[in-house]
Image (cartoon, grey):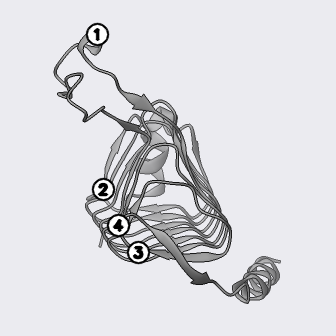
Amino acid sequence: MAYLSHAELMGMGFKKIGNGVKISDKASIYEPEKISIDDYSRIDDFCVISGRVEIGKYCHITPMCLVAGGEPGVYLADFSTLAYGVKIFSQSDDYSGRTMVNSLVPKKYKDEIFKKVEIGRQVVIGANTVVLPGVIVAEGCAIGASALVLQSTRPWGMYVGIPARRIKERSKALLDLEKKFVNEVRDDSI
């Protein structure tokens, strides 16, 4: 995997780009002026990032993910991870049949849903999961592969299925590891 150079990243016109950010040269970035990426985060091959998106520190967006921030936005807090093929939408059409859904049709014929999506700190979202508009995936949650997240979650739970449902608690032991990691990184930079 080849990453864009620092000069290439700076030339794209991001709203904010942190230190040590890595973005694959095979990722597609649309409207970079609406996108903020904090320190040491990474976006891999064949990802599509568009619209209003804020990515925290040490976030990893693995290959083939879609983060469609649109106008309301998608917000990923520090240490969050999107596994292969995750799709996050902050906008959607009304599929009931009362309105049209084609993006080539004028808005007056449509009833679009616009709601921000928040992905909390230390969240991992499993491969091929879909997160729909208005969802808040609370801190520390783990979402199993191929889940459909229609509703917000409660912190530190493990969720699976279609629709996603909480099956058990997730350990908070990783918070101690996070502290050790952050201190280790801080000590190495001094």
Cα distance between the residues tagged 4 and 1: 32 Å
Residue at (45, 49) in percent of width and height: 9
Q: Is mark 2 on a helix, strand or loop?
A: loop
Q: How crowded is mark 4: few (under 14 residues within 10 Å), some or many (20 or more)?
A: few
Cα distance between the residues tagged 3 and 4: 13 Å
Location of mark 1 (residue): 108
Location of mark 4 (residue): 162
Task: Point out the tag, 3 or 1, that comes first from the N-terminus.
Answer: 1
Residue at (32, 71) in percent of width and height: 146
Work out whether residue 167 or residue 29 is closer to the camera in this orientation and state it: 167
Task: Point out the tag, 3 or 4, that comes first from the N-terminus.
Answer: 3
Residue 98, placed above or below residue 8: above
Foreground mark, 3 or 4, reads 4
Residue at (39, 63) in percent of width and height: 163
The amino acid pointed to by label 3 is Gly
Residue 55, placed above or below residue 175: above
Q: Is mark 1 on a helix, strand or loop?
A: helix
Q: What element carries label 3?
A: loop
Task: Point out the tag, 1 or 2, that comes first from the N-terminus.
Answer: 2
Relative image position of residue 105 (x, y in whole percent): 18, 18
Work out whether residue 3 or residue 134 is closer to the camera in this orientation and state it: 134
Location of mark 3 (residue): 126
Q: Residues within 10 Å of mark 2 (few under 14, many from 20)?
A: some
